[in-house]
Image (cartoon, grey):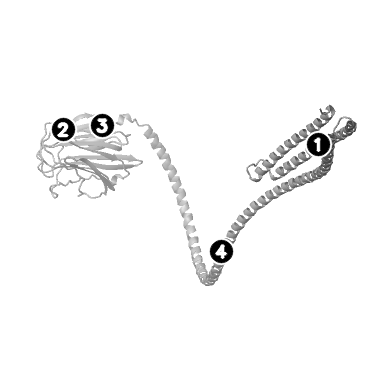
Amino acid sequence: MRNSRHLKVITSQIENLEDLKSQLETIGAHVLTVIEKAELWIQEKENDFTFLEMSQFLMIETSKFITKCHNIASDNTESAKAVSTSRLSVETSLSGSCTTNRDEKEFEILKERLEKMEKTISTHSRKYKTVNQKLKALENYSETIHSQTEQNDWIMQELNSASEFMTQIQSENELLTERITSHEHSVSKLNGVSESWQLKQKRLEEQVEHIQKTVQTNEKSNRMKVEELGKEVHVTNLAINSSNKKFVVLQDNVTALGVKVGDVSLEMQTLCKKVEEIDYPSMYVVFSAHVDLKTMEWTLKKNMIVNCFRAVSYSLGGYDPKTGIFTASCYGIHRCRVSICTSTDQHIQLGLFKEDINQTYQTRYQYYPQVGKIPLPQRKSSNSRNRKPHQMSKSFGQCDPEDVDEFDDDFIISGNLDQSQCSDETLVATSLDQVEKTERMSRILCNVQLNQGDKLIKETSVLYTYCSMNQKWCKGVFKGEAKKPKMKEDKLMV
Protein backbone atom coordinates (compact mmCIF):
# COMPACT_ATOMS: atom_id res chain seq x y z
CA MET A 1 0.00 0.00 0.00
CA ARG A 2 1.08 3.56 -0.81
CA ASN A 3 1.51 6.03 1.91
CA SER A 4 -1.45 8.30 2.27
CA ARG A 5 0.71 11.34 2.56
CA HIS A 6 2.54 10.52 -0.65
CA LEU A 7 -0.75 9.91 -2.41
CA LYS A 8 -2.05 13.37 -1.39
CA VAL A 9 1.06 15.07 -2.75
CA ILE A 10 0.88 13.25 -6.07
CA THR A 11 -2.87 13.81 -6.48
CA SER A 12 -2.48 17.53 -5.71
CA GLN A 13 0.19 17.82 -8.37
CA ILE A 14 -1.97 15.92 -10.86
CA GLU A 15 -4.88 18.30 -10.13
CA ASN A 16 -2.61 21.28 -10.69
CA LEU A 17 -1.52 19.87 -14.04
CA GLU A 18 -5.10 19.13 -15.09
CA ASP A 19 -6.12 22.64 -14.08
CA LEU A 20 -3.22 24.04 -16.11
CA LYS A 21 -4.28 21.89 -19.05
CA SER A 22 -7.89 23.12 -18.92
CA GLN A 23 -6.73 26.75 -18.69
CA LEU A 24 -4.42 26.28 -21.66
CA GLU A 25 -7.21 24.59 -23.63
CA THR A 26 -9.61 27.54 -23.01
CA ILE A 27 -6.84 29.97 -24.00
CA GLY A 28 -6.17 27.94 -27.15
CA ALA A 29 -9.88 27.88 -28.09
CA HIS A 30 -10.14 31.65 -27.63
CA VAL A 31 -6.99 32.10 -29.71
CA LEU A 32 -8.53 29.99 -32.49
CA THR A 33 -11.69 32.19 -32.55
CA VAL A 34 -9.56 35.35 -32.77
CA ILE A 35 -7.55 33.83 -35.63
CA GLU A 36 -10.74 32.85 -37.52
CA LYS A 37 -12.14 36.39 -37.17
CA ALA A 38 -8.89 37.86 -38.51
CA GLU A 39 -8.95 35.45 -41.48
CA LEU A 40 -12.57 36.39 -42.28
CA TRP A 41 -11.57 40.10 -42.27
CA ILE A 42 -8.68 39.30 -44.65
CA GLN A 43 -11.09 37.41 -46.99
CA GLU A 44 -13.51 40.44 -46.84
CA LYS A 45 -16.31 38.25 -45.50
CA GLU A 46 -16.64 40.38 -42.37
CA ASN A 47 -16.66 44.20 -42.61
CA ASP A 48 -17.49 45.14 -39.03
CA PHE A 49 -13.93 46.40 -38.29
CA THR A 50 -11.66 48.85 -40.06
CA PHE A 51 -7.92 48.22 -40.42
CA LEU A 52 -7.05 50.18 -37.28
CA GLU A 53 -9.82 48.58 -35.28
CA MET A 54 -8.78 45.08 -36.38
CA SER A 55 -5.09 45.65 -35.56
CA GLN A 56 -5.99 47.10 -32.18
CA PHE A 57 -8.32 44.15 -31.50
CA LEU A 58 -5.54 41.62 -32.25
CA MET A 59 -3.04 43.45 -30.05
CA ILE A 60 -5.49 43.55 -27.14
CA GLU A 61 -6.27 39.84 -27.47
CA THR A 62 -2.59 38.85 -27.62
CA SER A 63 -1.88 40.91 -24.48
CA LYS A 64 -4.76 39.14 -22.78
CA PHE A 65 -3.31 35.76 -23.76
CA ILE A 66 0.13 36.73 -22.45
CA THR A 67 -1.29 37.98 -19.13
CA LYS A 68 -3.20 34.75 -18.70
CA CYS A 69 -0.03 32.72 -19.38
CA HIS A 70 1.84 34.92 -16.90
CA ASN A 71 -0.80 34.25 -14.28
CA ILE A 72 -0.60 30.53 -14.93
CA ALA A 73 3.20 30.65 -14.60
CA SER A 74 2.99 32.53 -11.28
CA ASP A 75 0.56 29.93 -9.99
CA ASN A 76 3.04 27.17 -11.02
CA THR A 77 5.90 28.81 -9.06
CA GLU A 78 3.85 28.60 -5.90
CA SER A 79 3.02 24.98 -6.65
CA ALA A 80 6.77 24.33 -7.24
CA LYS A 81 7.55 25.70 -3.78
CA ALA A 82 4.97 23.38 -2.34
CA VAL A 83 6.50 20.52 -4.30
CA SER A 84 9.96 21.34 -2.94
CA THR A 85 8.68 21.26 0.61
CA SER A 86 6.92 18.04 -0.10
CA ARG A 87 10.16 16.74 -1.64
CA LEU A 88 12.05 17.38 1.59
CA SER A 89 9.41 15.64 3.54
CA VAL A 90 9.40 12.82 1.06
CA GLU A 91 13.17 12.50 1.20
CA THR A 92 13.11 12.36 4.93
CA SER A 93 10.35 9.84 4.84
CA LEU A 94 12.21 7.91 2.16
CA SER A 95 15.38 7.87 4.22
CA GLY A 96 13.47 6.53 7.13
CA SER A 97 11.51 4.09 5.08
CA CYS A 98 14.51 2.79 3.22
CA THR A 99 15.89 1.52 6.33
CA THR A 100 12.70 -0.06 7.34
CA ASN A 101 9.98 -1.09 4.91
CA ARG A 102 10.61 0.28 1.40
CA ASP A 103 12.07 -1.29 -1.54
CA GLU A 104 15.04 0.31 -3.21
CA LYS A 105 13.41 0.13 -6.60
CA GLU A 106 10.51 2.27 -5.52
CA PHE A 107 12.88 4.77 -4.05
CA GLU A 108 14.74 5.06 -7.30
CA ILE A 109 11.52 5.49 -9.20
CA LEU A 110 10.45 8.29 -6.89
CA LYS A 111 13.82 9.86 -7.15
CA GLU A 112 13.63 9.86 -10.93
CA ARG A 113 10.19 11.42 -10.78
CA LEU A 114 11.47 14.12 -8.46
CA GLU A 115 14.32 14.87 -10.83
CA LYS A 116 11.90 15.12 -13.71
CA MET A 117 9.71 17.43 -11.71
CA GLU A 118 12.71 19.62 -10.89
CA LYS A 119 13.58 19.77 -14.56
CA THR A 120 10.01 20.70 -15.48
CA ILE A 121 9.94 23.37 -12.77
CA SER A 122 13.24 24.81 -14.00
CA THR A 123 11.97 24.84 -17.57
CA HIS A 124 8.72 26.52 -16.47
CA SER A 125 10.62 29.13 -14.52
CA ARG A 126 12.69 29.87 -17.60
CA LYS A 127 9.57 30.04 -19.73
CA TYR A 128 8.00 32.36 -17.16
CA LYS A 129 10.95 34.70 -17.39
CA THR A 130 10.80 34.73 -21.19
CA VAL A 131 7.03 35.18 -21.13
CA ASN A 132 7.34 38.03 -18.65
CA GLN A 133 9.89 39.70 -20.92
CA LYS A 134 7.59 39.22 -23.92
CA LEU A 135 4.72 40.66 -21.89
CA LYS A 136 6.70 43.77 -21.12
CA ALA A 137 7.70 44.04 -24.77
CA LEU A 138 4.03 43.65 -25.81
CA GLU A 139 2.96 46.30 -23.33
CA ASN A 140 5.54 48.66 -24.77
CA TYR A 141 4.37 47.68 -28.28
CA SER A 142 0.73 48.25 -27.35
CA GLU A 143 1.60 51.66 -25.96
CA THR A 144 3.44 52.57 -29.16
CA ILE A 145 0.53 51.23 -31.25
CA HIS A 146 -1.95 53.27 -29.17
CA SER A 147 0.10 56.39 -29.71
CA GLN A 148 0.36 55.54 -33.41
CA THR A 149 -3.41 55.03 -33.63
CA GLU A 150 -4.01 58.43 -32.03
CA GLN A 151 -1.53 59.95 -34.40
CA ASN A 152 -3.19 58.11 -37.32
CA ASP A 153 -6.60 59.42 -36.23
CA TRP A 154 -5.24 62.96 -36.19
CA ILE A 155 -3.68 62.35 -39.60
CA MET A 156 -7.02 61.01 -40.91
CA GLN A 157 -8.83 64.10 -39.62
CA GLU A 158 -6.29 66.30 -41.32
CA LEU A 159 -6.66 64.28 -44.51
CA ASN A 160 -10.48 64.58 -44.39
CA SER A 161 -10.25 68.33 -43.90
CA ALA A 162 -7.69 68.48 -46.72
CA SER A 163 -9.98 66.43 -48.99
CA GLU A 164 -12.90 68.76 -48.24
CA PHE A 165 -10.66 71.73 -48.96
CA MET A 166 -9.57 70.10 -52.23
CA THR A 167 -13.21 69.48 -53.29
CA GLN A 168 -14.04 73.12 -52.50
CA ILE A 169 -11.04 74.27 -54.49
CA GLN A 170 -12.09 71.99 -57.38
CA SER A 171 -15.63 73.45 -57.44
CA GLU A 172 -14.19 76.97 -57.36
CA ASN A 173 -11.86 76.04 -60.19
CA GLU A 174 -14.83 74.80 -62.26
CA LEU A 175 -16.69 78.08 -61.64
CA LEU A 176 -13.58 80.02 -62.57
CA THR A 177 -13.17 78.01 -65.79
CA GLU A 178 -16.81 78.74 -66.72
CA ARG A 179 -16.28 82.44 -66.05
CA ILE A 180 -13.09 82.41 -68.06
CA THR A 181 -14.87 80.79 -71.04
CA SER A 182 -17.69 83.36 -70.84
CA HIS A 183 -15.14 86.17 -70.64
CA GLU A 184 -13.34 84.71 -73.62
CA HIS A 185 -16.61 84.79 -75.63
CA SER A 186 -17.24 88.38 -74.54
CA VAL A 187 -13.66 89.33 -75.42
CA SER A 188 -14.09 87.79 -78.88
CA LYS A 189 -17.35 89.74 -79.31
CA LEU A 190 -15.61 92.93 -78.18
CA ASN A 191 -12.89 92.32 -80.72
CA GLY A 192 -15.50 91.97 -83.46
CA VAL A 193 -17.26 95.12 -82.21
CA SER A 194 -14.02 97.03 -82.18
CA GLU A 195 -13.32 95.97 -85.77
CA SER A 196 -16.80 97.06 -86.82
CA TRP A 197 -16.33 100.38 -85.01
CA GLN A 198 -13.08 100.90 -86.84
CA LEU A 199 -14.84 100.33 -90.16
CA LYS A 200 -17.62 102.71 -89.12
CA GLN A 201 -15.04 105.28 -88.06
CA LYS A 202 -13.43 105.11 -91.50
CA ARG A 203 -16.83 105.53 -93.14
CA LEU A 204 -17.64 108.46 -90.86
CA GLU A 205 -14.34 110.12 -91.72
CA GLU A 206 -15.15 109.74 -95.41
CA GLN A 207 -18.63 111.13 -94.84
CA VAL A 208 -17.22 114.04 -92.83
CA GLU A 209 -14.88 114.89 -95.69
CA HIS A 210 -17.78 114.73 -98.13
CA ILE A 211 -19.93 116.88 -95.81
CA GLN A 212 -17.17 119.46 -95.48
CA LYS A 213 -16.97 119.69 -99.24
CA THR A 214 -20.75 120.03 -99.54
CA VAL A 215 -20.79 122.63 -96.72
CA GLN A 216 -18.25 124.72 -98.58
CA THR A 217 -20.32 124.57 -101.75
CA ASN A 218 -23.52 125.29 -99.78
CA GLU A 219 -21.94 128.31 -98.11
CA LYS A 220 -21.30 129.84 -101.48
CA SER A 221 -24.82 129.14 -102.68
CA ASN A 222 -26.32 130.33 -99.36
CA ARG A 223 -24.48 133.65 -99.63
CA MET A 224 -26.10 134.20 -103.00
CA LYS A 225 -29.52 133.21 -101.64
CA VAL A 226 -29.14 135.43 -98.55
CA GLU A 227 -28.48 138.41 -100.76
CA GLU A 228 -31.55 137.59 -102.84
CA LEU A 229 -33.65 137.06 -99.69
CA GLY A 230 -32.50 140.43 -98.34
CA LYS A 231 -33.93 142.09 -101.40
CA GLU A 232 -37.19 140.11 -101.04
CA VAL A 233 -37.45 141.02 -97.34
CA HIS A 234 -37.21 144.68 -98.22
CA VAL A 235 -40.07 144.26 -100.67
CA THR A 236 -42.18 142.31 -98.14
CA ASN A 237 -41.61 144.96 -95.47
CA LEU A 238 -43.05 147.53 -97.82
CA ALA A 239 -46.06 145.23 -98.45
CA ILE A 240 -46.53 144.68 -94.69
CA ASN A 241 -46.65 148.38 -94.05
CA SER A 242 -49.39 148.79 -96.64
CA SER A 243 -51.34 145.80 -95.22
CA ASN A 244 -51.16 147.24 -91.69
CA LYS A 245 -52.94 150.31 -92.95
CA LYS A 246 -55.63 148.10 -94.51
CA PHE A 247 -55.94 146.09 -91.26
CA VAL A 248 -56.77 149.25 -89.33
CA VAL A 249 -59.63 149.92 -91.73
CA LEU A 250 -60.87 146.30 -91.39
CA GLN A 251 -60.76 146.52 -87.61
CA ASP A 252 -63.07 149.53 -87.72
CA ASN A 253 -65.49 147.56 -89.93
CA VAL A 254 -65.41 144.57 -87.53
CA THR A 255 -66.37 146.74 -84.58
CA ALA A 256 -69.34 148.03 -86.55
CA LEU A 257 -70.36 144.43 -87.38
CA GLY A 258 -70.12 143.52 -83.68
CA VAL A 259 -72.67 146.16 -82.87
CA LYS A 260 -75.01 144.73 -85.54
CA VAL A 261 -74.56 141.17 -84.17
CA GLY A 262 -75.63 142.40 -80.74
CA ASP A 263 -78.78 143.78 -82.28
CA VAL A 264 -79.46 140.44 -84.01
CA SER A 265 -79.05 138.54 -80.72
CA LEU A 266 -81.68 140.78 -79.12
CA GLU A 267 -84.09 140.04 -82.00
CA MET A 268 -83.44 136.29 -81.62
CA GLN A 269 -84.32 136.48 -77.94
CA THR A 270 -87.63 138.15 -78.79
CA LEU A 271 -88.36 135.45 -81.41
CA CYS A 272 -87.64 132.68 -78.87
CA LYS A 273 -90.10 134.24 -76.45
CA LYS A 274 -92.76 134.28 -79.21
CA VAL A 275 -92.12 130.62 -80.02
CA GLU A 276 -92.50 129.65 -76.36
CA GLU A 277 -95.91 131.33 -76.31
CA ILE A 278 -97.24 129.13 -79.17
CA ASP A 279 -99.89 126.47 -78.31
CA TYR A 280 -98.57 123.23 -79.87
CA PRO A 281 -101.56 120.82 -79.47
CA SER A 282 -103.91 123.19 -81.27
CA MET A 283 -101.73 122.97 -84.39
CA TYR A 284 -101.90 119.19 -84.97
CA VAL A 285 -103.54 118.64 -88.40
CA VAL A 286 -104.56 115.26 -89.91
CA PHE A 287 -106.85 114.56 -92.86
CA SER A 288 -107.83 111.72 -95.18
CA ALA A 289 -109.41 112.15 -98.64
CA HIS A 290 -110.31 109.64 -101.35
CA VAL A 291 -111.95 109.46 -104.76
CA ASP A 292 -115.68 110.10 -104.85
CA LEU A 293 -117.56 106.84 -105.36
CA LYS A 294 -119.80 108.49 -107.99
CA THR A 295 -116.80 109.11 -110.22
CA MET A 296 -115.23 105.63 -110.23
CA GLU A 297 -114.19 105.59 -113.90
CA TRP A 298 -112.57 108.03 -116.31
CA THR A 299 -111.53 107.95 -119.90
CA LEU A 300 -108.16 109.66 -119.68
CA LYS A 301 -106.79 111.85 -122.37
CA LYS A 302 -103.45 113.34 -123.08
CA ASN A 303 -102.43 116.16 -120.69
CA MET A 304 -105.59 115.66 -118.61
CA ILE A 305 -105.41 116.55 -114.90
CA VAL A 306 -107.80 114.49 -112.72
CA ASN A 307 -108.98 116.06 -109.44
CA CYS A 308 -110.11 112.89 -107.70
CA PHE A 309 -109.65 113.53 -103.94
CA ARG A 310 -113.09 115.06 -103.32
CA ALA A 311 -114.56 112.73 -100.69
CA VAL A 312 -113.19 113.35 -97.16
CA SER A 313 -113.22 110.43 -94.69
CA TYR A 314 -112.10 112.50 -91.70
CA SER A 315 -110.33 115.80 -91.18
CA LEU A 316 -108.98 117.68 -88.19
CA GLY A 317 -108.77 120.83 -90.25
CA GLY A 318 -106.60 122.31 -92.91
CA TYR A 319 -107.99 120.56 -96.05
CA ASP A 320 -110.61 122.03 -98.46
CA PRO A 321 -112.03 119.36 -100.84
CA LYS A 322 -113.54 121.99 -103.15
CA THR A 323 -110.27 123.74 -103.89
CA GLY A 324 -108.00 120.76 -103.11
CA ILE A 325 -105.82 122.97 -100.89
CA PHE A 326 -104.33 121.66 -97.61
CA THR A 327 -103.10 124.41 -95.25
CA ALA A 328 -100.07 123.21 -93.25
CA SER A 329 -99.68 124.82 -89.87
CA CYS A 330 -95.92 124.25 -89.53
CA TYR A 331 -92.72 123.18 -91.22
CA GLY A 332 -91.17 119.75 -90.63
CA ILE A 333 -91.94 116.22 -91.86
CA HIS A 334 -95.33 115.57 -93.58
CA ARG A 335 -96.39 111.98 -94.16
CA CYS A 336 -98.31 111.31 -97.45
CA ARG A 337 -99.86 108.06 -98.62
CA VAL A 338 -101.54 107.24 -101.97
CA SER A 339 -103.43 104.01 -102.88
CA ILE A 340 -104.29 103.18 -106.51
CA CYS A 341 -106.24 100.23 -107.98
CA THR A 342 -106.77 99.30 -111.66
CA SER A 343 -109.01 96.68 -113.27
CA THR A 344 -107.07 96.12 -116.51
CA ASP A 345 -103.68 94.64 -117.24
CA GLN A 346 -101.92 97.96 -117.61
CA HIS A 347 -98.81 99.65 -116.22
CA ILE A 348 -99.15 102.33 -113.57
CA GLN A 349 -96.36 104.84 -113.03
CA LEU A 350 -96.25 106.85 -109.83
CA GLY A 351 -93.66 109.51 -108.92
CA LEU A 352 -93.15 111.70 -105.87
CA PHE A 353 -90.94 114.83 -105.79
CA LYS A 354 -89.98 117.13 -102.98
CA GLU A 355 -88.39 120.11 -104.68
CA ASP A 356 -86.93 123.51 -103.92
CA ILE A 357 -85.04 126.03 -106.07
CA ASN A 358 -81.47 124.85 -105.40
CA GLN A 359 -81.75 121.02 -105.24
CA THR A 360 -84.23 118.18 -105.36
CA TYR A 361 -84.36 114.97 -103.29
CA GLN A 362 -86.00 112.19 -105.28
CA THR A 363 -87.15 108.78 -104.08
CA ARG A 364 -87.51 105.99 -106.59
CA TYR A 365 -89.87 103.03 -106.21
CA GLN A 366 -90.37 100.25 -108.77
CA TYR A 367 -93.08 97.61 -108.49
CA TYR A 368 -92.61 94.23 -110.21
CA PRO A 369 -95.00 91.27 -110.19
CA GLN A 370 -94.47 88.89 -107.22
CA VAL A 371 -91.38 90.80 -106.02
CA GLY A 372 -92.48 93.71 -103.87
CA LYS A 373 -91.25 97.18 -103.13
CA ILE A 374 -87.53 97.97 -103.64
CA PRO A 375 -86.44 101.50 -102.58
CA LEU A 376 -83.50 102.96 -104.55
CA PRO A 377 -82.75 106.45 -103.13
CA GLN A 378 -80.89 108.93 -105.35
CA ARG A 379 -80.02 112.62 -105.32
CA LYS A 380 -80.10 114.98 -108.32
CA SER A 381 -79.77 118.70 -108.92
CA SER A 382 -82.94 120.65 -109.86
CA ASN A 383 -83.57 123.77 -112.00
CA SER A 384 -84.89 121.61 -114.90
CA ARG A 385 -88.56 121.61 -115.86
CA ASN A 386 -88.55 118.78 -118.43
CA ARG A 387 -87.16 116.16 -115.98
CA LYS A 388 -88.16 112.47 -115.81
CA PRO A 389 -89.54 111.50 -112.39
CA HIS A 390 -88.65 108.28 -110.60
CA GLN A 391 -91.39 105.76 -111.23
CA MET A 392 -93.25 102.75 -109.85
CA SER A 393 -94.50 100.22 -112.37
CA LYS A 394 -96.56 97.05 -111.99
CA SER A 395 -98.79 94.94 -114.24
CA PHE A 396 -102.28 94.57 -112.76
CA GLY A 397 -105.07 92.08 -113.48
CA GLN A 398 -108.66 92.19 -112.27
CA CYS A 399 -109.08 94.68 -109.45
CA ASP A 400 -110.43 93.29 -106.21
CA PRO A 401 -110.67 95.10 -102.87
CA GLU A 402 -107.31 93.78 -101.71
CA ASP A 403 -105.44 94.52 -104.99
CA VAL A 404 -104.34 97.99 -103.90
CA ASP A 405 -100.82 99.36 -104.32
CA GLU A 406 -99.71 101.92 -101.78
CA PHE A 407 -97.09 104.61 -102.21
CA ASP A 408 -95.71 106.30 -99.05
CA ASP A 409 -93.22 109.10 -98.72
CA ASP A 410 -92.34 112.04 -96.48
CA PHE A 411 -92.42 115.74 -97.35
CA ILE A 412 -89.56 117.42 -95.46
CA ILE A 413 -90.81 120.98 -95.32
CA SER A 414 -88.06 123.42 -94.34
CA GLY A 415 -85.87 125.97 -96.06
CA ASN A 416 -83.96 129.22 -96.04
CA LEU A 417 -84.89 130.73 -99.44
CA ASP A 418 -86.09 134.26 -100.10
CA GLN A 419 -89.68 134.61 -101.39
CA SER A 420 -88.52 136.35 -104.51
CA GLN A 421 -86.52 133.28 -105.50
CA CYS A 422 -89.48 130.86 -105.18
CA SER A 423 -91.79 129.81 -108.00
CA ASP A 424 -94.24 126.96 -108.59
CA GLU A 425 -93.11 124.30 -111.01
CA THR A 426 -95.23 121.82 -112.96
CA LEU A 427 -93.44 118.54 -113.57
CA VAL A 428 -94.25 116.24 -116.51
CA ALA A 429 -94.19 112.42 -116.14
CA THR A 430 -92.99 110.07 -118.86
CA SER A 431 -94.74 106.77 -119.59
CA LEU A 432 -92.80 103.50 -119.65
CA ASP A 433 -94.58 102.33 -122.81
CA GLN A 434 -94.23 105.49 -124.89
CA VAL A 435 -91.44 107.84 -123.99
CA GLU A 436 -92.73 110.77 -126.11
CA LYS A 437 -96.31 110.75 -124.77
CA THR A 438 -96.94 112.24 -121.32
CA GLU A 439 -100.07 112.39 -119.21
CA ARG A 440 -101.10 112.77 -115.57
CA MET A 441 -103.86 111.25 -113.54
CA SER A 442 -103.75 113.52 -110.46
CA ARG A 443 -101.48 116.03 -108.80
CA ILE A 444 -100.75 117.05 -105.23
CA LEU A 445 -98.97 120.37 -104.92
CA CYS A 446 -97.64 121.43 -101.51
CA ASN A 447 -96.71 125.11 -101.19
CA VAL A 448 -95.20 125.97 -97.81
CA GLN A 449 -94.33 129.51 -96.72
CA LEU A 450 -92.20 130.09 -93.60
CA ASN A 451 -91.16 133.18 -91.70
CA GLN A 452 -87.56 133.54 -90.46
CA GLY A 453 -86.78 136.97 -89.13
CA ASP A 454 -87.89 139.62 -91.61
CA LYS A 455 -87.74 137.26 -94.62
CA LEU A 456 -90.42 135.01 -96.04
CA ILE A 457 -89.12 131.53 -96.88
CA LYS A 458 -90.91 129.26 -99.37
CA GLU A 459 -90.46 125.61 -100.37
CA THR A 460 -92.41 123.58 -102.94
CA SER A 461 -93.20 119.84 -102.80
CA VAL A 462 -95.11 118.09 -105.59
CA LEU A 463 -96.64 114.59 -105.69
CA TYR A 464 -97.62 113.13 -109.11
CA THR A 465 -99.57 109.97 -109.86
CA TYR A 466 -99.45 108.66 -113.43
CA CYS A 467 -101.49 106.33 -115.54
CA SER A 468 -100.98 104.97 -119.09
CA MET A 469 -103.13 106.13 -122.04
CA ASN A 470 -105.51 103.14 -122.10
CA GLN A 471 -106.33 103.33 -118.39
CA LYS A 472 -110.09 102.67 -117.92
CA TRP A 473 -110.61 103.70 -114.31
CA CYS A 474 -108.72 104.14 -111.02
CA LYS A 475 -109.27 105.25 -107.48
CA GLY A 476 -106.88 106.80 -104.99
CA VAL A 477 -106.64 107.84 -101.37
CA PHE A 478 -104.41 110.65 -100.08
CA LYS A 479 -103.55 111.09 -96.39
CA GLY A 480 -101.52 113.94 -94.94
CA GLU A 481 -100.32 114.66 -91.42
CA ALA A 482 -98.40 117.50 -89.76
CA LYS A 483 -97.22 117.66 -86.12
CA LYS A 484 -94.88 120.65 -85.65
CA PRO A 485 -95.22 124.14 -84.10
CA LYS A 486 -96.97 126.72 -86.27
CA MET A 487 -94.86 129.34 -88.04
CA LYS A 488 -97.30 130.61 -90.75
CA GLU A 489 -100.33 129.20 -92.58
CA ASP A 490 -99.16 127.49 -95.77
CA LYS A 491 -101.17 125.63 -98.40
CA LEU A 492 -101.15 122.13 -99.83
CA MET A 493 -103.09 121.87 -103.09
CA VAL A 494 -104.74 118.59 -104.20
**Front-most of residues 349 and 290:** 349
| First of labels 3, 1 by sequence position | 1
| First of labels 1, 2 by sequence position | 1
Q: Closer to the observer: label 3 or label 4? A: 4
Residue at 35% over, 32% down: 278
Residue 194's image quarter?
bottom right
Looking at the image, do the residues carrying marks 3 and 4 touch, with CB atoms under 8 Å apart?
A: no
Kind of residue sitting beneath label 3: Val
Give the position of the N terminus as an image quadrant: top right
Element marked by disc 3: strand
Q: Closer to the observer: label 1 or label 2? A: 1
| First of labels 3, 4 by sequence position | 4
Kind of residue sitting beneath label 4: Gly
Give the position of the C terminus as an image quadrant: top left
**Front-most of residues 404 and 471:** 404
| First of labels 1, 4 by sequence position | 1
Q: Closer to the observer: label 4 or label 2? A: 4
Between marks 3 and 4, how big is the CA–CA gap?
Answer: 92 Å
Q: Is residue 21 left or right of residue 5?
A: left
Residue 440 is marked as: none
Residue 192 is marked as: 4
> Counting other residues with Cα less than 10 Å from the Cα at mark 2, is it few (<14), some (14-19), or many (20 or more)?
few
Which percent across, then down, holds residue 373? 21, 40
Which percent across, then down, holds residue 112? 83, 38
Element marked by disc 1: helix
Residue 286 is marked as: 3
Element marked by disc 2: loop
Looking at the image, do the residues carrying marks 2 and 3 touch, with CB atoms under 8 Å apart?
A: no
